[in-house]
């Protein structure tokens, strides 16, 4: 993956500058985030990445690939890249966190509150308001409740 991304970044000339630092991509397991300052450069980089991936027998899953523009101002909803269409979105979930075009965390906080509310509602229906009754004997076992964040 590192070799493929090095060649993609080099040939596609991607990257954004923040202060004195240049950021080109973020890699994690099977997912990659490419960063570019112009849509045309991003489309070129995706085309190059597809070519590089094909040498290893890999293919980009175009239905899972999304483009996010910060700040949002794109009028088109899809972009043609090589032999695939890439959806332009206002927000997406990457590594379990919502990233949106505002650059803030409000959307992620509201999403996490919704997940917690959903978990609590399931506990309410399936445990606390169920017809299951415990005997009034002393319970010698510890009970653990885990709230999982996805």
Image (cartoon, rainbow, N blue to C red):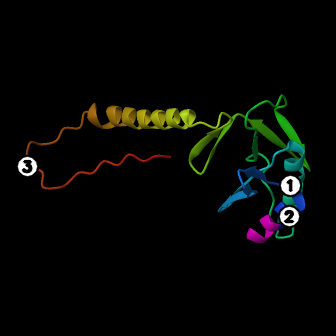
Query: Which is nearer the eye, 12 or 61?
Result: 12
Which of the two labelled residues, at mark 3 and mark 2, occupies the earlier sequence position?
Answer: 2
x and y, in percent, of residue 72 in the image: 75, 32
Q: Secondary structure at mark 3?
A: loop
Quadrant for residue 101, please give it.
Answer: top right
Of tags 1 and 3, the one toward the viewer is 1
Name the residue that disc number 3 marks.
138
Instruction: Give the foreground label among 3 and 2.
Output: 2
Assign a secondary structure to mark 1: helix
From the viewer's perspective, tell me whether residue 1 is left or right of residue 38. left
Name the residue carrying label 1: 45
Mostly what secondary structure, the magenta segment? helix
Q: Which residue shows up at 86% across the image and 54% down it? A: 45
Magenta range is: 1-6
Which residue ends up furthest to the front in the rendered image?
Answer: 20
Picture residue at 74% right of the left edge, 69% below the top: 2
Residue depicted at 38% across the width and 45% down the height: 147
| Residue 21 to residue 134: above or below | below
- The residue labelled by disc 2 is 10
- The Cα atoms of the two marked residues, 3 and 2, are separated by 67 Å
Marks 1 and 2: CB-CB under 8 Å? no
């Amino acid at each position: 993956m590192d070799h493929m991304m090095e060649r993609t970044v080099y040939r596609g000339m991607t990257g954004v500058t923040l202060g004195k630092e240049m950021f080109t991509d973020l890699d994690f397991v099977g997912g990659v985030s490419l960063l570019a300052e112009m849509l045309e450069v991003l489309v070129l980089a995706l085309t190059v990445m597809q070519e590089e991936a094909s040498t290893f027998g890999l293919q980009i899953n175009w239905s899972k690939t999304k483009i996010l523009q910060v700040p949002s101002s794109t009028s088109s909803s899809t972009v043609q890249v090589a032999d695939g269409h890439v959806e332009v979105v206002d927000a997406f979930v990457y590594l379990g966190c919502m990233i949106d075009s505002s650059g803030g965390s409000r959307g992620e906080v509201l999403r996490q509150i919704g997940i917690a509310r959903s978990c609590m509602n399931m506990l309410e229906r399936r445990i606390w308001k169920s017809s299951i009754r415990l005997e009034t004997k002393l319970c010698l076992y510890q009970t653990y409740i885990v709230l999982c964040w996805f």
